[in-house]
Structures are given as C-alpha cells and as structure tokens.
Image (cartoon, rainbow, N blue to C red):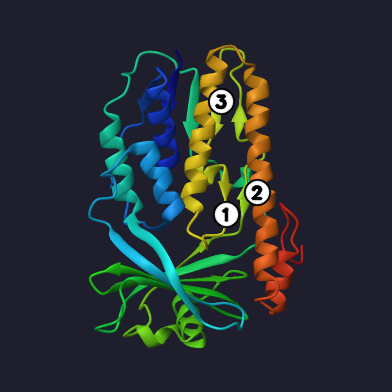
Amino acid sequence: MSLVAIAGSGLAELTCARLLASRGHRFRLAPEPATPAGSRPLLLNRPTLDLLDSLWGGGLLDGTWELGHRHVTWGGGPAERFPQPARVVDGTVLAARMRERLGPGHPDGEDPLWTVTAVAPDAAHRQCGRRELLAGTAQLRPGGDERTARLATTALGWVHLTPLGAGRCLAQAMVPGPAADPAALLARLLDQTGSLSVLLLPPRTAVAVPAAPRLHPAPALPPADGTGGLLTVGAGALRCDPLSGTGTAQALRTGILAAAVIDAAAVGTSATALCAHYAARLHGAFQEHLRSCARLYSPAFPDPAWQDELAVPVGGHPHA
C-alpha cells in the first residue's frame, strides 16, 4: 500500500494518518518541532465531539473543560440562553495526544507517494475580505457562570466569551478590517455588547489575526513524473469564520477526504480525477460558507465597512 508523508502535526493531518493506517497504508510523521507550540484554545460543539469520538475513540478529551449552555444576543434581537454541550480544549495538547496514539510511523528511507500538509503559502489562497479576529484572555468575576459561552453583536462585529476554567475566559471579537490597537478595540466592543459585566477587567493584551474566509485553489495535486502527490488539508486548504464551533470539524473532514483520495488511488481510481473531486468538494463547502456568512452577517452588521466586506468577491479586497 502507499507510503504517505504527514508533513505536520495538525488535527487534520494526524486524522488523515490514522485513517490511512486503519486501511493498511503506511505513514511517516514529520519530526516534532524543537520549540513547543503555545496554547491554542478550541471550542468544540457536540457534532464535532461526536466526530472526534468516531475517529479516535474515547479518552482523547479527558480533563478538558465542559460547557453546558450558550447565551446569545444577535443583531438587536432578544437575549436567549439555551443548552449547548461543548468542550474547550487546547489544540496543542489534543494534537500531542493524537500523535501519541499514532505511534512512530514508518522510518525514513523510501520516497512517499503522497504528502499531506496543512501548510500552504498565503499567496496560494483566494481570500474573501480583510476581516480580523481579536483575542485576549481575562478573569471572570468571582461567582460567575463558568459553564456558559456568550455571543453578542454590535454594528462593528461579534464578541464571544469562552470560559476556560479556573476563572479564566477567552474573549474574542470579529471586526471587518485590520485593527491598529487590538486590545483597545476589543475592550470597546466588550463594553458595547455588555460583555464586560461578566469580566473583572478587559484583556490587558490582545492579538489580531487574519480571519477572512479563504480557499486554496489547487489543494490536491496527483503524483506525476516521479514526483509524489500533494494534498493540502485543514486551514491550509479551507478557512471559515470561527463562529459556530464547527471549524475543527471542517478541518477533520478535509483529513477524512484526503485519506479517501489516497485509498481510492491505491486501488486504481484515477488520481487526477480524485484530486479534481477533492478540490470541487472544498470549493462547494467554501461557497456555502460564504452564503451563510452573508445571510447571518448582513442584517446584524449595518456598519458600511461590514457591508463592503461581505460584498468582496473571492480573491478580492474592499476598495481595490
């Protein structure tokens, strides 16, 4: 069966390796980075948890923080609190647990037929807009609800609070363009949405990271002329807005689909046709995500900057 190089330790890459191994293929893991990655909080909803459990079995999320409800105030509508089971996990720890379950993989000494990677140059992507995600951590007020995530909106974007346990909280906000002072803007949006009422203070520091939806136009290349095939998975292939708690599930699905491509090619299905199908599936998911964003965001964010952002075609920029 095929030898596949797994070029990183992302959740999609490692899931692809696990599925390949279950189907008799061999995999080679990239060396672990010399400098450990920092903490990466992820909010996983019930469908994502079920998917992880079906792929990896139980015990992978032992010790992670469990949430039970979500409180939502969207676009000036009434506040609603409803049950929504979820878990908050450190993506770095989760990846380390996955890697431990995989084992060492195949040793060096043979050229792989395929490489699976979650890394792609920014220039390779078609990006839809310029929006950024602001993020920082803060302390919840003593006695506050540590089992409820909170989502609220202002004209300039949405704000989300994710309890992390031990009184800590991840504060995030999505805004329609680059932020010169992320901490100050995050504090202002927290205040405008009333979210500061559950925090002792706004985050002292915050980061701003690009968050516009983007798609790799050529995420799958078949083996050719002695060169192995290349499958891009995870955020390297497709990045969606981090609002619904389904981003991790989307990444895992790219790993599942990549494993299916390699497995089908190994039994004689055209690798070229399989790669085209892989790209088409991602393109379809991306277009549906853009339509969902337009339906959800347009009525909630009247600010002209957001209306410009939502009108950007794939690969374009506002006022270009």
Q: Do the residues under discs 1 and 2 have CB atoms within 8 angstroms?
A: yes
User: Which residue occupies 50% across, 53% down?
Assistant: 247
In the image, is residue 144 above or below residue 164? below
Tell me residue 286's x, y (percent): 65, 49
Closer to the camera in the image, 32 or 44: 44
The answer for how far apart the CA atoms under marks 1 and 3 are is 22 Å
Write down the residue under mark 3: 261
Let me know if residue 265 appears in the view: yes
Circle 3 SS class: helix
Write down the residue under mark 1: 240
Tell me residue 86's x, y (percent): 38, 60
What amino acid type should be assigned to the residue bearing mark 2?
Phe
Q: Which mark is residue 202?
A: none
In the image, is residue 244 above or below residue 27? below
Of mark 1 and mark 3, the one earlier in the sequence is 1
Circle 1 SS class: loop
Image quadrant assignment for residue 26: top left
Image quadrant assignment for residue 136: bottom left
User: Which residue occupies 36% across, 31% down?
Assistant: 30
In this picture, residue 4 sits left or right of residue 168: right
Of mark 1 and mark 2, the one earlier in the sequence is 1
What amino acid type should be assigned to the residue bearing mark 1?
Cys
Let me know if residue 33 appears in the view: no
What amino acid type should be assigned to the residue bearing mark 3?
Val
User: Which residue occupies 47% across, 58% down?
Assistant: 245
Write down the residue under mark 2: 286
Circle 2 SS class: helix
